[in-house]
Amino acid sequence: MKKRPGSRRIILKAPWEIEKLRAANQIVAEILAELKELITSGITTGELDRIAAERIKQKGAKPAFKGYHGYPACTCISLNEEIVHGIPSDKKVIKEGDLVSVDLGVILDGYFGDAAFSTFAGSPPTEQARKLAEVTKEALYAGIAKAKHKKRLGDISAAIQNVAEGHGFGVVRKFVGHGIGKALHEPPEVPNFGTRGTGPVLRKGMVLAIEPMLTIGSYDVDILDDGWTAVTGDRSLSAHFEHTIAITDKGADILSDGFI
């Protein structure tokens, strides 16, 4: 769910706020882990969304995406060439070998959680598709490894880009990571491409949602007629992984840990 933040002020979180953010993100992680096990040939994206909605309610949270700028569902579930913001539907039946990306956000006690993963329904259709998913996850963790107090935001972006392009994959430019806290999207934006040593200084207490989106081909993006679903311009496969992290004196604390 990617709308650009308004105010440019970066909000540092107190330790107690980070624990609230951890609680929200752990709900996200638990639900994503369950959805990951349910993804199989024959299930619809609409059914997965209903399961997520019920789990969010059971855990005492609220969906972060539903109603956000008019978005109609609790999850974004994107298939194959869909990059992000795929709208769940009972008409979208997952098939064997499909590349399925699931993005989920919740609100708990006024604080947001946000994370995403990509997986396959059954076996990957090609070796290149399998590698795309693996490298996207590798790029995520490469970016997280650079999220350190007194480093620069560009260090995160450059690390992601270097891993992606080093394996020959495209890096989506249109959609970026973001700060997160009492709003789903806060400053700063976290691009998945950039130059080391540039951008805002990273500080203890910053909380970021880092989310590389890679493609097998072009990084150009088209938006479908539903006004939400973003697809690759050349209709090549795309993968998406996301964690919410807090920056500490000792590096990145992954608040959404546990589902990938």
Image: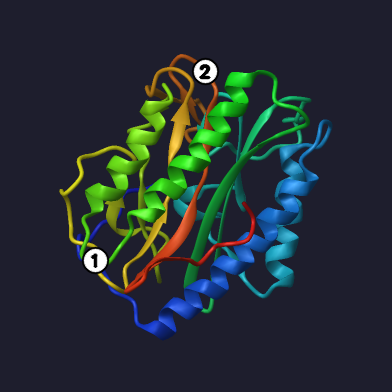
Residue 1: which numbered mark, if any?
none
Q: Residue at x 77, y 30 (%)?
A: 93
Task: Name the secondary structure under disc 1.
Answer: loop
Counting other residues with Cα less than 10 Å from the Cα at mark 2, is it few (<14), some (14-19), or many (20 or more)? some
Residue 110 shows in the view: no
Q: Residue at x 18, y 61 (%)?
A: 201
The x and y percentages for residue 250 are 36, 71
Q: Earlier in the sequence, mark 2 or mark 1?
A: 1
Q: Nearer the viewer, residue 104 or 195?
A: 195
Q: Nearer the viewer, residue 43 or 241?
A: 241
Q: Where 253 falls versus 230 (above or below)?
A: below
Name the residue tied to disc 1.
10
The x and y percentages for residue 148 are 30, 63
Seen from this angle, which residue lies furthest bottom?
16
Seen from this angle, which residue lies furthest left?
198
Q: In this rendering, would 229 be left or right of 77?
A: left
Q: Check disc 2 and give the amino acid type.
A: Ser
Name the residue tied to disc 2.
236
Task: Name the secondary structure under disc 2.
Answer: loop
Q: Nearer the viewer, residue 32 or 183?
A: 32
